[in-house]
Image: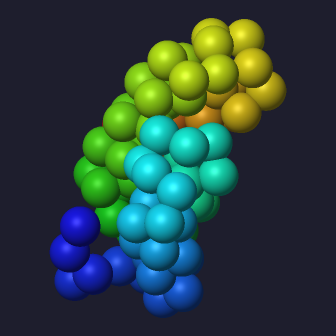
């Protein structure tokens, strides 16, 4: 994963988490979710959408479709998609 255009410490934590525990570990996925939200807040809705889609798919596979983390990611993805359509 490139650190170019990664918003601050969130990006560094996501990269470190994935490297140390594996990219499909729930903690690494949570970091990916947080990074996606940081992209969205920075105005990069395309990157936020892409990362939330990946994270949602992985949360569904690892934790199941009804886990609170999965549901939160699904809601945030819907909000970012809506923001993309409005913006």
Can you say whether 31 is above or below 12 in the image? above
Q: Determine whether, in the image, residue 5 is placed left or right of residue 7.
A: left
Q: Which is more toward the observer, 52 or 32?
A: 32
Q: Position of residue 2 (x, y in %)?
A: 20, 75
Q: Which quarter of the rendering shows the N terminus?
A: bottom left
Q: Position of residue 45 (x, y in %)?
A: 36, 55
Q: Which is more toward the observer, 16 or 39?
A: 16
Q: Which is more toward the observer, 58 or 33?
A: 58
Residue at the location (47% across, 74% down)? 16
Residue at the location (56% across, 23% down)? 62
- Extreme bottom residue here? 8
- Extreme front residue here? 20
Q: Determine whether, in the image, residue 11 is placed left or right of residue 79.
A: left
Quadrant in the rendering for residue 60: top right
The count of marks equals: 0
- Extreme top residue here? 65
Residue at the location (63% across, 13% down)? 64
Q: Position of residue 3 (x, y in %)?
A: 27, 81
Q: Determine whether, in the image, residue 65 is placed left or right of residue 61.
A: right
Q: Position of residue 15 (x, y in %)?
A: 41, 71
Quadrant in the rendering for residue 72: top right
Can you say whether 46 is above or below 65 in the image? below
Residue at the location (42% across, 49% down)? 23
């Amino acid at each position: 994963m490139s650190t170019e255009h990664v918003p601050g410490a969130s990006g560094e934590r996501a990269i470190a988490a994935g490297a140390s525990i594996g990219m499909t570990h729930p903690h690494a996925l949570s970091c990916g979710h947080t990074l996606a939200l940081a992209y969205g807040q920075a105005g990069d809705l395309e990157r936020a959408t892409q990362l939330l889609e990946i994270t949602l798919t992985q949360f569904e596979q690892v934790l199941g479709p009804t886990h609170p983390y999965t549901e939160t990611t699904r809601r945030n993805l819907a909000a970012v998609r809506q923001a993309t359509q409005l913006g």
